[in-house]
Image (cartoon, helix red, strand yellow):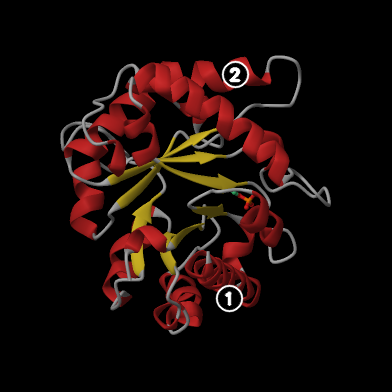
Amino acid sequence: MNSKNKKLIVANWKMNVVSEKDAENLFLSIKNVVPKLDYVKMVTCPPHMYVSQVAALVDHPNYRVGGQDAYPEESGSRTGETSVLMMKNAGAEYIILGHSERRHLETKLDVARKISAVLEHEMTPIICIGEESRDKTWKKQLQKQLQDVFTRVPKKNPENIIIAYEPIWAISSDKKSPASAAECMEALEVIKAELLKIFKTAKAVSAIRFLYGGSLDDKNIEEFLKETDVDGFLIGRVSLDPRILMTMFRLVDDHVYQSSLKKEEE
Ligand code: PGA
């Protein structure tokens, strides 16, 4: 199975798992499911201190491990920081960067340096981009975020870059329908047009993978599967609920399978 056909599901546990036991139980509750699916690849992003523990439980290529942030320098006098190299040595292959819950703690330069360091270590950055609200500046907000980071990072290997479109107003929202598939497509159009200006070629932009994130669950994921062309999803709150997560895996797997059948018929 070509891994390009698989949808990537990134589970961002945030700071919601507070002991080794919790981390183990949560991971084990879904561990047997993903290997049975043909079209799903899952990246679990635990809090830093449980990364190596979860990595040690991974025994199938459909599972990978990621971090929720990392410091760009390899080592040194940086009290309290965890470096990209440390994360790599602990078993992480992906790092979520620029998440809106961290943006107040870091400058655009910090985010750009982190992306560069992750790429230098041949890991995959999952870069979060999203507008604060859908006011009349929303497109400009996305364009600025992209310019702020991507003009400062190496553009050699766009296939190693993942961008997660996460409208900030849609993250962990209690609204029934926080963002629609149409809004996601509209934003991706803006994002891709801006990336074309930065990366210069359509080939480079098409090599970048795009995720959607923001209050996804088993009720709304089908809309995004049917009406967008995203390569996967970044999931926060419901990644802590194995029952919902498993339903989402099956919906994703089934959707990609049905679409591949349709393509064969054409
Ligand atoms: P959510 O979180 O699924 O709870 O909205 C997504 C995220 O913050 O990455």
Q: Which mark is residue 222?
A: none
Q: Is residue 83 placed above or below 260 in the rendered structure?
A: above
Q: Residue placed at 60% from the left, 15% from the top?
A: 140
Report helix, strand or loop for mark 2.
Answer: helix
Left or right? Give the position of 10 relative to 190: left
Q: Which mark is residue 141?
A: 2
* Residue 239 picture location, percent across and down: 57, 63
In contact (CB < 8 Å): disc 2 and disc 1: no
Q: Residue placed at 69% from the left, 15% from the top?
A: 137
Left or right? Give the position of 222 relative to 240: right
Q: Amino acid at mark 2?
A: Gln
Q: Is residue 114 placed above or below 86 in the rendered structure?
A: above
Q: Amino acid at mark 1?
A: Arg
* Residue 129 picture location, percent across and down: 52, 32
Give the image quarter of residue 244. bottom right
Q: Residue placed at 21% from the left, 30% from the top?
A: 156
- Work out whether residue 127 or residue 53 is closer to the camera in this orientation and state it: 127
**Mark 2 residue crowding within 10 angstroms, few (<14) / some (14–19) / many (20+):** some
- Can you identify the residue that label 1 sits on? 250
Left or right? Give the position of 157 relative to 125: left
Q: Is residue 46 visible?
A: yes
Which comes sooner in the sequence, label 2 or label 1?
2
* Residue 223 picture location, percent across and down: 71, 56
Report helix, strand or loop for mark 1.
Answer: helix
